[in-house]
Structure formats: C-alpha cells, structure tokens
Amino acid sequence: MKTDMVRQIRSRESQGWPIVVVIVDDHPIAADGLKSYLETTSDIRVAAICHTAVDALEVVAAIQPDVVLLDVRLDGSRINGLEVAQQLRRKFTHQQLKILLVSAYCSAQYVFDAVAADVDGYILKSSKDAEIIEAVYAVMQGIGVWDRNVKKVLNGYNSIHDIEHDAHVRDALNSYHSLTPREKEVLALIAANYQNDAIAANLYIVSGTVKQHVNSILRKLALKDRRQLQVWYRLNRDKLIG
C-alpha cells in the first residue's frame, strides 16, 4: 500500500470520517436496499443514488466520493456502467476514486471490459451484505476485490483469448522488454482504452504513427487485437518493469 494512502486512511479513521459512497443502479429498489445495509455501519455514508449514466457522471464529479458502487447494466442510459467506469477513470486519473462494480451478471465480455476499465473490484449482487461492506473497506485500502465467479472467468482468459498455454504468457512478458519506450507508452494508453486519435494527441504524434506502433506491439507480444492487449496488460501490469 502506498505511504500517502496509508496516511489518508489513518487520518480518516482518527477523525472519524466515514467512507463516502455513491451508488449507481437503474433499479431504485436494489439501490435503496444497497444503501440500507451499507449504512448499517457508521464507517460508510451513502451520499447519493443515481439511476442513469448521465446523473452518475455529474454527481460523482460534484461530490467526489471515495467509492462508486456501479451496476454494469444501466437500462435506459445511452452508455452502460462499464463505459461510465472508463470515463470516471479517465477523469480521476489520480486513482483516489475507487470503482467497485456490483452486478447480477459476470459474462466474459463484462469481466474483460471491467479489467480494461481498470476498476478496483467486481462483485455480484448475490453477495452477502457483509461481503459487500468488506469489499468497500478493501478497495479503500487498495485491495482488488473479485467475486469467485468473476475469477473463474479470468482464470479462463488464456483459452477464451486464444492464448493456449501459460508459456505463451511468459513469452509475452519477456517480449514486453523488447518494446521501445514509445511502444510501452502506447500500450499503457491502449490499456486505458484510448483510441488512436487520442493516443496521437496525448503523445504529440500522428495517428498513422500510432497505428504502426500498435501493429508492432501486437507482433512482438504475439497477441491478436487491442482487446487482448488491454486484458493482458491489466492482468500483468504489476510484473511489467523497466
């Protein structure tokens, strides 16, 4: 855990500040139920409940909570919870905001999109009340929380993404060190879900050059597409040094 995070948590505890939470769920009954059992502890205060993606983005920007509990599916919204997570992560790049997905679903597509969005956890609505409260505590301390069913999907990552053996993943880790410094920058931005034009603007290069870098990265890591790059990078980020 980073030193500044330790100080922040200890300061919060010593002053009796609660963890400020915003709930984003399109079902009012589910949201109200989640609020009720989160507030069974004095350590957590639900500052707002949002039922649409637009409201969520506005409210989180205004309140700046510690944790957002975000439903994956937001019926009636133009974008879903995973896209909300991506936008929040881009806006709050300091990583102080914790994003915890709470969903009834854990399809492979949702799980991989969650990893790509760099959320702090993914739990199911079937979790016990105490488990959800513990998940909030955990992400506040920088600990990722993944439901066991979500982990099963992640453990099947190699076969789902046509990477057949763990040896291939090890080879990809070794190949990472063959990337140029610029390619590593491009890869990190791809992992953050930036598109080529945005990467070009961020690095002050042209889109055609970005495309060349992307093709080179895919070739060197022997991965198939941007989605594989995103998931592979997220799962292996802690091992990527130098």
Image (tube, rainbow, N blue to C red):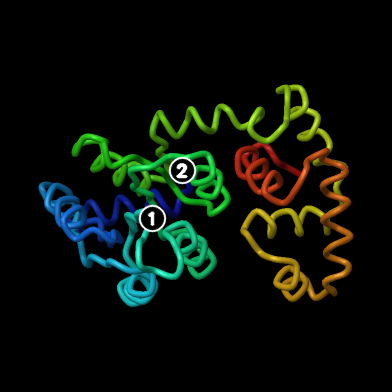
Residue type marked 2: Met
Q: Position of residue 98 (x, y in %)?
A: 40, 55
Q: Position of residue 140 (x, y in %)?
A: 35, 49
Labelled disc at residue 152:
none
Q: Position of residue 82 (x, y in %)?
A: 47, 57
**Residue visible at 36% across and 77% down in the picture:** 58
The quadrant of the rendering that contains the C terminus is top right
- Label 2: which residue? 1
**Residue visible at 65% across and 38% down in the picture:** 236
- Label 1: which residue? 73
Q: Residue furthest front?
A: 76
Q: Gap between marks 2 and 1, in whole Å? A: 31 Å
Front-lying residue, 35 or 134: 35
**Residue visible at 40% across and 54% down in the picture:** 99
Q: Position of residue 32 (x, y in %)?
A: 15, 57
The relative height of residue 83 versus residue 165 in the rendered view (above or below) is below
Residue type marked 1: Arg
Name the N-terminal-most of marks 2 and 1: 2
Front-lying residue, 112 or 90: 112
Q: Around disc 2, counting alpha carbons within 10 Å, would you say few (fewer than 14), some (14 to 19), or many (20 or more)?
A: few
29 relative position to 117: left or right:
left
**Residue visible at 35% across and 62% down in the picture:** 75
Q: Secondary structure at mark 2?
A: loop
